Image (tube, coloured by chain):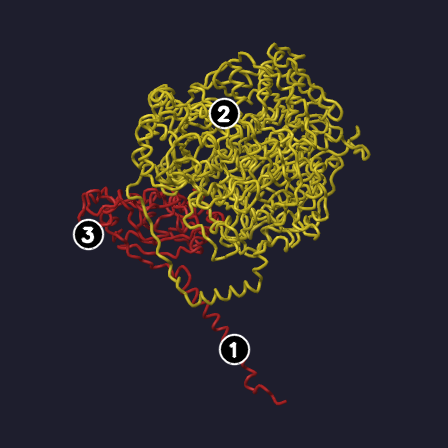
Amino acid sequence: MANFFPRWTNYTPLKLAICAGIAGVGLVAAFTYYATPKAQRVGYMPSQPIPYNHELHVQQLGLDCRYCHSFVESSGHANVPSANTCWNCHQHVKTDSPKLEPLRKAIDKNYENYDGKPIEWVRVHSAPDYAYFNHSAHVNRGVSCESCHGDVHEMEEVYHAESLSMGFCLDCHRNPEKHVRPLEEVYNLDYDAEEYLEENKEVADVVNAFIAENDELKRKRLSSQEKLGHYLVDHWNVQPKESCSTCHR
Amino acid sequence: MSKKVLHHPETPENEAATSVWRSLREREDTIKFRHQSIREFYDAEDTMTEDERELSRRNFVKLMGASTALAGLGMAACRRPESYILPYADAPEWIVPGRPLYYATNMPAANGAVPLVVTSYESRPTKLAPNNTHPDKQGTDAQVQASILNLYSPSRSKSFLKDGGEVDAGEFEKFFSTFVKSAGKLGVVFGADESPTRNRLAREIQKKFPEVKFYSYEALENDVANKAVADAFGEKRVKLTPDFKKAECILSLDSDCLELDAKSSVLEFAKKRQGGSDGYDKELEKNKMNRLYQVESIFSLTGGMADHRLRIAPSQVSKVAVAIAKEIQSLAGNPKLAQALNGLTATFSGEEDYINDWAKACAKDLVGKKGKALVLVGTQQPSELHLLGLAMNEALGALGSTLNPYAASGQAYGTINDLKADVDAGGVENLLLLTPSNPIFDAAADADFDAILDKVGISIHFGERTDKTAYSCSWHIPATHYLESWGDALTANGFYSIVQPLILPLYPDTFSEIDVLTAIATGNYMSAPTATEPSEAHNEVKTTFTKQFSRQANDWNALLKNGYTKVRGYNKATLASIGSTSKLKSFYEQAPTNESLEVILAKDYSIGDGRYIDNAWLQEAPDPIIKLTWDNAAIVSPKTAKDLGVYDEIVQLETWNAARPAIGEAGGARAPMAKISVGDTSVKVPVIIGFGQADNTITLPVGYGQAADDGRESANRFIKGRPAVGDVGLNTGFNVYPLRKSSSEFLLKGAKVEKTKDKYKVASTQEHHAMYGRALAREVSTMDSPSKGDFAHQLENVSKQGMDSHIPKNIPLYKARDTNQEDLISDKKHQWAMTIDLNTCTGCNACLIACQAENNIPVVGKDQVALGREMHWIRMDRYYASQEHEYDSHGHIKKDEKTPAWVQDNPAVVPQPVACTQCESAPCETVCPVNATVHTEEGLNAMAYNRCIGTRYCANNCPFKARRFNFFDYNKRNPLMEKNLYRGPLGEKKVGSPEHLQRNPNVTVRMRGVMEKCTYCVQSLELAKIKQKQITKKKAEAAGGSINVELTAKDLMIPINGVKVACQEACPSDSIAFGNLLRNGENGIGKDTVVKAKESKRNYELLKYIGTFSRTTYLARVKNPNPEMPDAKYIGLATINIH
């Protein structure tokens, strides 16, 4: 019987394998780029029923985060403000603005379209149902809003700034010093560790002394944030857990 | 798959004389049982249902292929769906989204209101816990814990009915607005609980309409006995409330005083059981323990706790009582007792000879503890025995000391027989039924409720369920649940307690009892409450309170906060004269024989008198003693079963086809049906064996068989369009109420049993998740034992029982260290641990239901339970143990000398709750291929449900059998509809089903293919830790800046006993201790109770020789026998070794 397959077919399996390999690598690369939370979520900026401007309220009017997200220090949820919180000011300010129509619908009993139903804010940041993130556990231990939500105070419209993937959480749980700051500065989204230490010389001295006493840390090149972070993590006994039940129940 | 084989050591000789078993087949040691015992699940074929067999692997692959192809075509769901946040428009006060609020309220009940603290998430009540600040310390039992599910029951009554057909609210309003203006000859039937507002409104109605008459009815209240007792005190109504705090020696005559008949705090009993130790501050002392004598015919939970249990037919309980009373009379003469005993004699002969000694020693002990002794009589016993019990209590100085007689103020309400008489005489023309009972279903034949309904003009039924009575009356008013209503109630000791709503009524047409009564009293139609305006009932309750119970200004707010006031609604009553007990003799003269048996109509541990039939948690909770779920059955003793010729059949029939070597109590488990007739009435029910049941007696739990559409004989027919039960109660059990001829009768004589050829499928859990090993549950006796030594020695040896002293030192090859050589279980602040005290655990299932409520555990339905797939994270094991051989004086077994038959036939019952024990070196973790179950730094064996792929390796490798697998999507798809689970994606989903509102938002709702188990309520632990972290801010304020704060591990530890897990909170006897092992008293850190408990000599580790280092440990049970009793030497030896 003659050779059924011609000679050139000898290399076909190899070629196929190489192609499959390239395709496989490509697939993985594409998946990581396009399908992971980093690609899927970052930049998500849905339009809201009321185009609430954080930049205006925080930077120009000087509102604290906790004026609206009032329970962030005591509850797992950082609440979106109820309509009456907005109404505290807006019954006096810009009441007739057409942008505020949904608010008046929810709260203004004198408004013709009043129905008393809650405003439907579109969710931007959402943890999966099986992940139980607790805001109070973080803000009470020196993790700022900014660490997960980005520079919200500069956002005219809120968008998803960080990936908020499990890896993102674990990065910080493994190296909390990169994010921990004095409790007084948690809601100061303009905070910069270097400036803080420059302004508070006595704190800088204490922190530097702490680093100098620590054999391991003094050999490393640390940023101001890391120095202060290490100091606070040590003094506050911050030990973020990495075990599953910390977030999953 | 076969089970992982563990090689257990030999049983030591001093424990070997006790034989131990869980089920009949284990007792008989059938080949089939042995075959099964080595397997993880039942034989594959036996386990599969018809539907599963149909769904072959081939079909499965086909379906999967098709669905994958379809998914590829669609690709519709690539973008994350938009979701919304809806904050309150106008935020209510106090509510912090994500944080629960706790409110005090009370659950009204015939035996006294149950003080509760209710957890509420955004105004949605999710969980009940006992109100521990209440002076009554009532605790909660399984039925109380499960009562929250009634609120969310899908089959709740939601609309008005007229002649059984739905009508809108307007039509009823039209009728009722005129009706209340001229109530006329109205008969109002209340429940048996005490409500001051109801009493006050009844008086007002009486004033306005003098012809209105009031009655009180609940199916299992013994009206005749209640009246006889009240007469003895010269009062209209008397409540006898035992005080276990003072009682040191208790004789219970057929009274399940720790569970179904519990009229006071079980906690106080449990405390007395701990021999002077309070929170394990010292070792138990034997002479400070109380002692419980139990005379009973069915095995009750109280019987399981008793030091001495006498197994005897219900009619003969009176005879034993007389024998004991005679002895008391001769030791401590009392004129009232002498009078009560007049003409009564009782001596036992033949096989029962030992009872004479039993009675004598018991009486001597009682008299020796005069003033601290207590005699309790079971509700179902005849009124004469209740009177004799009173006389015995009088002679023992119990009245006013260990037994508080309270006179209930207010008018006396008539009984159901009075109602019948009044209806017959024309004194009552219309009827309003407010009772929680279901009289057309559960009233005795002599009350003839059908005839009452025929004779009255208008009958109005008020209730939470559209039961048979609702459809039989001319009108039905849907009732609010007690968590939606305003009301008030008195607890067992008479403390005025408030019933306050946690939520606006879920269904707008529902009203509360007080609303209805107010409408009659004022002549105005009921007003529904709104978000801002409470209902009329609120004002009425407030009026009652300010008029009768308020002592100072602002009391009302304190009442709402605490749930009670210390003002009592009862007065002390004093015994006047005891009525005639002469009829007692004729009651006990004739003992039952196997030709003429005695039937006990018993309250069911799950569904009570039938009112909880639509409560899925209770239906699925295994009966604490016989372990049957979803049904009732006739319970007979092994000997009676043999006499009736069904014993072998039952042994055979435990498989669906006995000819094959099929195994298990699996899907095929059947029980033979028998016809039980009393007089001219008969019921056809399945028969099962109950060890410890008195011979020649049959226990028939009541309340089941309210509706069935499968053609079963002894059940009401299910009528479409008039459903008397929902999905849950349909086709469950058999109706045995027709046997009851008279309202005063719960014990029926002269029953005959006829075998039939029919079989009935039963789902019993007694062999499920069976553990094997040495000394699983341990018991010691305060008495010297030839085999085990004296009490001190026995205490020392608790941790050595079951060969635990012979375990070689555990030197693990694998060091539990991480890469930095640090301990894997490394946390320096919290190391969680639990102890379960078998000495006080009654086995009541409260923990099991509380766990279900807290952890979103689904119900799986009868068929799935039969296959061993129940999901309860806590498994309530129940072991029987009886000593078969005598010991000689050196503690060696006398192989040729058996113990007397009456000892062997009366086994001890040892309940043991087992959940995941959180092994430090957990066998489940090492076999998980995806790391879905891993250890936390705090010693928890955690579950990451979203990671689990369902290999079930972990369950197979668990020596405690503590893991549960979601074979189906029980949470999403209704398992109670026939074959629904097998329809896959096409199955009926529970979308919008109200029971989802009960879910705990802090716990994942698990889906199909996921393994789950107890994780020590990790959600509560995390919340407690997070709360403690707020200390950083507090300290920062004090230190003038967070930079100056220094926190130690001690600062971040949650407070002493700072967190309670769900089972611990629910336990009415405080048997579960939970806490932080690092709170060990060193360096000024206080001690958690659990640490103290673990220091007790009674502490031991389950399956210690396997070397898994369990975090949950158990405390051995202590029995306190009276050395003079004939059975004393057989008590306290029930150490459970299972082969």
Please indicate, yes or no, whether residue A206 appears anywhere in the rendered image: no
Find disc 3 in the rendering and name its residue.
A98
Q: Is residue B845 visible?
A: yes
Residue at point 54% right, 38% down? B704
Residue B737 is situated, as x and y percent measured from the top left of the image, at 55, 34
The amino acid sitting under disc 1 is: Leu
- Report the front residue among B871 and B470: B470
At label 2, counting other C-alpha atoms closer than 10 Å, the crowd grade (few under 14, some 14-19, many 20 or more) is many
Going from the N terminus, do you reach mark 1 or mark 3 first? Answer: 1
Residue identifier under label 2: B417
Is label 1 in a helix, a strand or a loop?
A: helix
Mark 1 → mark 2, Cα distance in angstroms: 92 Å
**Which chain is depicted red?**
A
Residues marked 1 and 3 touching at CB (< 8 Å): no
Residues tagged 1 and 2 counted as in contact (Cβ below 8 A)? no
User: In the rendered structure, the residue with mark 3 lies on which chain?
Assistant: A
Mark identifier at residue A16: 1
Chain coloured yellow? B
Vertical side of B670 occupied by B280: above or below: above
Q: Residue at x 37, y 37 (%)?
A: B510
